[in-house]
Amino acid sequence: MKPLTEDEKWMGRCLQLARCGQLGAPPNPMVGAVLVADGHIIGEGYHRRCGQAHAEVNAFASVTRPDLLQRAKMYVSLEPCAHWGRTPPCARLIVEKGIRQVVVGCVDPFARVHGEGIRILREAGIQVTVGVREKECLQLNRRFVVNQTQGRPYIMLKWAESADGFIDRLRADGTPVRFSTTRSSLRTHRLRAACQAIMVGRRTALLDNPRLNVRLTDGPQPLRIVLDSQGTLPPSLHLFDGSQPTLVAGFHDNPLRQNSSAAYEFLALQPHDGILPQVLDHLHARGIQSLLVEGGARLHQSFLEAHLWDEIHVEKSPVSLGSGLPAPRIPVQAHTEEETALGSRFIHAWMP
């Protein structure tokens, strides 16, 4: 295995720091920054929370020996910002601090930055190296990259299926067979905590009556989304309890819900346009960067057929059903990895 260069080593530390912002930074990207002088870290930081100080600002704030900055080298996993938003531009701050060398992991895909931060640094006479551990830096912020380059949320499909490949079967009393255990559900709640929105279809909402919240781990509560094209879901469902924001997307709102205490926002869909593109456009417009789809086979198949997915998570139960609704198929071109834990197989798939 090829040994890491000095630049690669310190960029690795940037990546470690950046991951600490996984729950707080979105919809902003996760970013880590490190200041190195004479082979030692003299300051480091990461973007903790959207709207708060960026990684570079926190790195400078942690420095206890400002006299070392004149010979320090700054490492940052994402191109320093160049625009005024809720915080000042970090590229200008780096120039003001007298840093002479900067190593950037990857270029920021955000249109208002995209190379502008690097230009500011170079025009100030700073030596800038770009692309150190670039693939890892882009992978870390793949949700942000998809959001900026494709104009939609990063989409994860998640379902559980039986050992013989069925996703849905009702018991004699009309209740659905459940595959997940309390322990394996923790994985689902971790996925939920890392996403800004969760979507289900009408059938899942009606049969499972899910709460679609984060209960088994720490993390922010997501926006709940349910597709109810004809407006037939009853107002008594947990989705409408007002405990967290809920968006109902359909062609017609339900008069029963309108005249009840149900708490939700209604998105009126146009009948001649695709349902999924309309919903995704709405989510993108309101700053939703990541979407977890937990619906049934039909909803998942709609995303797969439209090529609207970035990751797939499948829990394969040891229980066989013998019959039922067939589970969706993971596209053959996807890369997959499997793990056995908690009595089930877990399959993670992604596009190369």
Image: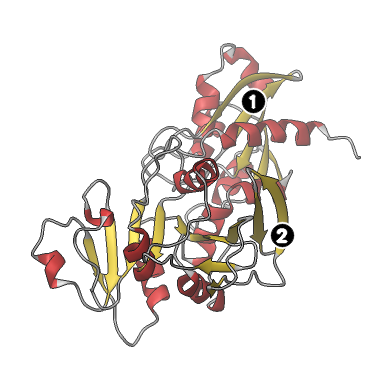
Whether the residues at callouts 1 and 2 have beta carbons within 8 Å, the answer is: no
Residue 135 visible to the viewer: yes
Residue 269 as seen in the image, left or right of residue 77: left
Residue 205 as seen in the image, left or right of residue 191: left
Position of the N terminus by quadrant: top right
The amino acid sitting under disc 1 is: Leu
Q: Position of residue 34 (x, y in %)?
A: 63, 28
254 and 100: which is toward the camera: 254
Q: Residue at x 47, y 57 (%)?
A: 292
Q: Residue at x 34, y 63 (%)?
A: 205
Disc with the residue nearer the chain's start (1 vs 2):
1
Label 1, residues with CA under 10 Å away: few <14, some 14-19, many ≥20:
many
Label 2, residues with CA under 10 Å away: few <14, some 14-19, many ≥20:
some
State the residue position of label 1.
35
Q: Nearer the viewer, mark 1 or mark 2?
A: 2
* Helix, strand or loop at mark 1: strand
Residue 336 numbered tag: 2
Q: Position of residue 32 (x, y in %)?
A: 59, 34
Q: Quadrant of residue 18?
A: top right
Q: Position of residue 120 (x, y in %)?
A: 56, 44
Q: CA distance from mark 1 to mark 2?
A: 37 Å
Image coloring type? secondary structure
Residue 49 sits above or below residue 160 on the image: above
The amino acid sitting under disc 2 is: Thr
Residue 307 sits above or below residue 225 on the image: below
